Amino acid sequence: MNNTQSAQTLRRRIALFLLVSTINFIASPFFAGSSTRVKAAPLFDGPTDFIRRVPLLTNDLVYSNTTGKIYATLPSTVGSNGNSIATIDPMTGVVSNTTFVGSEPTELALSDDGHSMYVWLNGSFMFRRFDALTNTPGLQFSMGQEPTSGRYVFRDFAVAPANPSVLAVARGIFNVGSPQGVAIFDDGVRRTNIGPIGLTDSIAFSASASKLYGTGPGTGLHTMTVDGSGVSVSSTSSLGQSTRIQFSNGLIYTSSGQVINPDTNTLLGTFPVDSFSHAFTIDSSVSRAYYLISDLGTFTLKAFDLNTFAQVGSLTISGVGFFPGATPLLRWGANGLALRTNNELILIQTSLIPSAEPIPTPTPTPTPSPTPTPSASPSPGVPAFVRQITLTTNDLVFSQATQKFYASVPSAEGSTGNSVAEIDPVSATVTNQTFVGSEPTVLGQSDDGATLYVGLDAAASIRSYNILNHTAGAQFLVGRDTSDGPYGFSDIAVVPGNPSAVAVARQKRNISPGVAGVAIFDNGVQRPNTGPGVFSGGSSSIAFASASVLYGDNLTQGLSTLSVDNSGVSLTGTNYFTPGNKIILANGLIYGSRGQVINPTTGELVGTFSNLSGLTQFTPSTWLTAALSSWDPTVRVFSLGLTISILF
């Protein structure tokens, strides 16, 4: 090939190369775009689950679509914000409001209006209505008592559709195992007819307020008709036995995974959950069912398709600690779920819920900067000053007239024993001791500011004592049982306005329980009629409301009301109450050593001071009677047998 031909060939090759390069350059964006479409990324290239854990002690949860907030009951153990309903933003976990509602709020039920809810107050055995829009507690009512068994409690409750004034309650009795029928309440007033006893543990309204579904222990699904007179069972089924139920879109869903058409009594299918399913929720808008499985400190959240009953995904939540039982599983927002454990609120956003809304990106928990260890200093607390007196005592009272305390001192104290000691709480000194008799124990103080009665255990008698001139007075026996000998006594109460008359809660000796009936003595002379014995409303601890009304604890119902007249004492009524081993009357209410407070006139529980289980072991001789005196609201005095402590 000559040079001319070579040059022409080279020019043709260069031209072809340039042409191909130009075509590739122009066409490359189109090819690249085509390639991107083929390998298109998912809609959200981010996390599929986000879990926020809020350290908060709660008893129950509900979610309102109206307000977009979660509402939780907080027990008294939370502290100053306890006994309340808390408003929580599920997006942030922030508690924006707490409202006091009553003693020990537990379960909640929300109306379909999105803001009217009912809360059970476990400390007073009452329901209370609450408005979430205004954060206002409303109507409060109890379900009363079963005369021979105890106070009614709930096993489940539900608000009627389109009528937030109507509440259906599957009742139980405190400390009694079997269901006690379904009752309907209109603004707290019960309709006449109640569903059958022993049948219903879990309830759910249909889309209509006139139809209610229920299941129970060993019983299947039953349909109840609700009308102006109350509840009646219209049909029963073997399906859904011993399960909790929810109603959604015309179907009944059970905690065991069954899906039932209640109108045709047909089992449509079963989600493959096991017996460890403690909570579930149905969202027919996305055709999903969510079941929570608990296993040794780990939750597994399982999602199922409502149409195929197949599991479509799951989420593991570890490190949950103790599982509190039937926690609610709530649906909130576009992709949210919420639940509670024994010590935290768990807020979840997950792709298990079909939604176009993205899942938040987890943010790291900030690490606090180290700070120098401060020098030792006293722990913050209530300002207090304690004086202690070494003195063996059996009982204490405080006198408004003398501003002194009086203690019964047994023979074990030595040469100054078998006496009543006068104590100055300001100087913490014994200012007088007077012999009164053999083994003084319980004390009863008159409202005249001078007269004190002392129980002399070893003499089976009561003796009067004048605290103004330190003089022991008349002494009288409290009687004897024909079989068991002289009576002892557990409490003394002086008749208001009559320092010569005293009520004595007598006890048989060496017999337990030994309640022998309350007797009234006038200047040592017993009135004929005495109160009932141990299993008929008899009392060990007593308190006068007036000269004609006396209250006492009892071993059967808990609180006895006794009428007092010239003939003696008669039992007029009882109420269910947990008194412990001492009662005190203050401001018209009875306070028991176990923490319960009752209105003795109405028989309704007012509330409960919780976490007092340790006090169940104290005896009346170490009861804090003086601690509740009105000598000074900043001073508390108590006896521990060998030591008297005065706390300022």
Image (tube, rainbow, N blue to C red):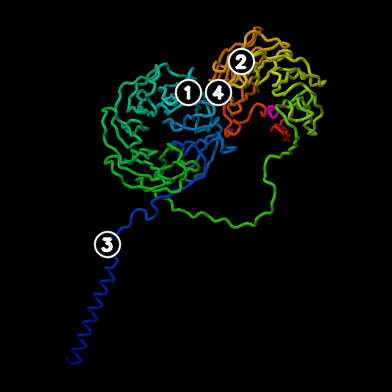
Q: Mark 1 or mark 4: which is in front?
A: 4
Disc 3 and disc 2 in contact, CB within 8 angstroms? no
- Residue at 28 percent across and 43 percent down: it is 310
Q: Which is nearer the eye, 197 or 568?
A: 568
Mark 4 neighbour class, 10 Å CA radius: few under 14, some 14 to 19, many 20 or more:
many
Q: What amino acid type is highlighted by mark number 3?
A: Ser
CA gap, disc 2 to disc 1? 29 Å
CA gap, disc 1 to disc 3? 71 Å
- Residue at 44 percent across and 53 percent down: it is 361
Q: Is residue 627 magenta?
A: yes
- Callout 3 secondary element: helix
- Residue 152, numbered circle: 1
Dot placed on the residue nearer the N-terminal end, 3 or 2: 3
CA gap, disc 3 to disc 2? 98 Å
Q: Tell me the residue that label 4 is attached to.
A: 577
Q: Mark 4 or mark 3: which is in front?
A: 4
Q: Tell me the residue that label 3 is attached to.
A: 34
Disc 1 and disc 4 in contact, CB within 8 angstroms? no
- Callout 2 secondary element: strand
Residue 579 coordinates in the image, percent (x, y): 58, 25
Residue stretch in magenta:
623-629
Q: Tell me the residue that label 2 is attached to.
A: 517
Quarter of the image that includes the N terminus: bottom left
Q: Which is nearer the eye, 515 or 251?
A: 515
Quarter location, residue 439: top right
